[in-house]
Image: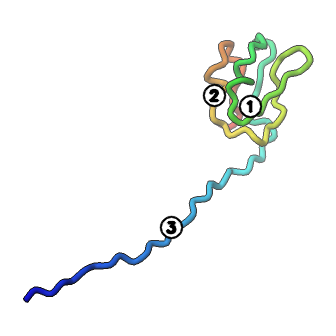
Amino acid sequence: MAENKTQTAEPVDEKKKTSKKKKRTNPNPINIYRKWCKACGICIQLCPQDVFDTDIDGYPIVARPFECTQCSICWLHCPDFAITSTEK
Protein backbone atom coordinates (compact mmCIF):
# COMPACT_ATOMS: atom_id res chain seq x y z
CA MET A 1 0.00 0.00 0.00
CA ALA A 2 1.46 3.33 -1.08
CA GLU A 3 1.63 6.12 1.38
CA ASN A 4 -0.08 9.31 0.32
CA LYS A 5 2.43 12.04 0.97
CA THR A 6 1.31 15.49 0.14
CA GLN A 7 3.69 18.34 0.29
CA THR A 8 2.40 21.53 1.70
CA ALA A 9 4.12 24.69 0.79
CA GLU A 10 5.05 26.99 3.57
CA PRO A 11 3.89 30.55 3.12
CA VAL A 12 6.54 32.69 1.58
CA ASP A 13 7.12 36.03 3.16
CA GLU A 14 6.94 38.53 0.36
CA LYS A 15 9.12 41.48 1.06
CA LYS A 16 7.58 44.73 0.09
CA LYS A 17 9.54 46.26 -2.67
CA THR A 18 10.06 49.84 -1.80
CA SER A 19 11.63 51.97 -4.43
CA LYS A 20 14.27 54.00 -2.76
CA LYS A 21 14.62 57.23 -4.61
CA LYS A 22 18.11 58.46 -4.83
CA LYS A 23 18.22 61.72 -2.96
CA ARG A 24 19.46 64.42 -5.23
CA THR A 25 22.17 66.66 -3.90
CA ASN A 26 22.64 68.58 -7.13
CA PRO A 27 20.07 71.39 -7.37
CA ASN A 28 20.60 71.59 -11.15
CA PRO A 29 19.96 68.15 -12.67
CA ILE A 30 19.71 69.51 -16.22
CA ASN A 31 20.99 72.50 -18.16
CA ILE A 32 18.90 74.42 -20.64
CA TYR A 33 20.88 76.43 -23.19
CA ARG A 34 18.54 79.32 -23.79
CA LYS A 35 20.42 80.51 -26.89
CA TRP A 36 19.68 77.19 -28.59
CA CYS A 37 16.11 76.82 -27.31
CA LYS A 38 13.23 77.97 -29.53
CA ALA A 39 10.62 77.61 -26.75
CA CYS A 40 8.67 74.88 -28.52
CA GLY A 41 7.41 73.41 -25.22
CA ILE A 42 8.10 69.76 -26.07
CA CYS A 43 10.13 69.25 -22.91
CA ILE A 44 7.37 70.76 -20.78
CA GLN A 45 4.68 68.57 -22.31
CA LEU A 46 6.66 65.32 -22.19
CA CYS A 47 8.11 65.58 -18.68
CA PRO A 48 6.45 62.87 -16.54
CA GLN A 49 7.51 64.57 -13.29
CA ASP A 50 6.28 68.07 -14.24
CA VAL A 51 9.71 69.57 -13.58
CA PHE A 52 9.42 72.52 -15.99
CA ASP A 53 7.57 75.81 -16.00
CA THR A 54 7.85 78.66 -18.47
CA ASP A 55 9.33 82.06 -17.89
CA ILE A 56 7.64 85.25 -19.10
CA ASP A 57 9.05 84.75 -22.60
CA GLY A 58 7.78 81.16 -22.89
CA TYR A 59 11.13 79.46 -22.43
CA PRO A 60 11.34 76.42 -20.16
CA ILE A 61 12.86 76.75 -16.73
CA VAL A 62 13.58 74.00 -14.23
CA ALA A 63 11.06 74.92 -11.54
CA ARG A 64 11.20 71.68 -9.52
CA PRO A 65 14.75 70.30 -9.87
CA PHE A 66 14.46 67.83 -7.00
CA GLU A 67 11.55 66.10 -8.77
CA CYS A 68 13.70 65.30 -11.82
CA THR A 69 14.36 61.57 -12.11
CA GLN A 70 16.83 61.82 -15.01
CA CYS A 71 14.47 59.86 -17.27
CA SER A 72 16.11 61.58 -20.30
CA ILE A 73 12.84 62.23 -22.14
CA CYS A 74 13.37 65.98 -22.30
CA TRP A 75 16.86 65.99 -23.75
CA LEU A 76 16.24 63.11 -26.13
CA HIS A 77 13.20 64.83 -27.65
CA CYS A 78 14.55 68.38 -27.72
CA PRO A 79 14.79 69.28 -31.42
CA ASP A 80 17.43 71.94 -30.70
CA PHE A 81 19.65 69.83 -28.42
CA ALA A 82 19.26 72.64 -25.88
CA ILE A 83 18.90 70.36 -22.83
CA THR A 84 21.70 68.35 -21.28
CA SER A 85 22.00 66.34 -18.11
CA THR A 86 24.48 67.22 -15.41
CA GLU A 87 24.35 63.73 -13.92
CA LYS A 88 24.34 61.26 -16.82
Check disc 1 and report its element: helix, strand or loop: strand
Check disc 3 and report its element: helix, strand or loop: loop
| Residue sitting at x 44%, y 72% | 12
Mark with earlier residue (2, 3): 3
Residue with the most extreme left position: 1
Give the alpha-carbon distance from disc 3 to disc 1, as whole Å: 37 Å
Residue 35 higher or lower than 12, as above or below: above
Mark 3: few/some/many CA within 10 Å (<14, 14-19, 20+) = few
Where is mark 2, residue-wise?
Answer: 73
Q: Position of residue 4 (x, y in %)?
A: 18, 84
Residue 41 higher or lower than 64, as above or below: above
Q: Position of residue 74 (x, y in %)?
A: 67, 26
Q: Position of residue 48 (x, y in %)?
A: 68, 33
| Residue sitting at x 61%, y 58% | 18
Residue mark closest to the camera, 3 vs 1:
3
Asked if marks 2 and 3 touch (Cβ < 8 Å), the reply is no
Where is mark 1, residue-wise?
Answer: 30
| Residue sitting at x 35%, y 76% | 9
Q: Is residue 57 left or right of residue 67?
A: right
Where is mark 3, residue-wise?
Answer: 14
Q: Position of residue 32 (x, y in %)?
A: 77, 23
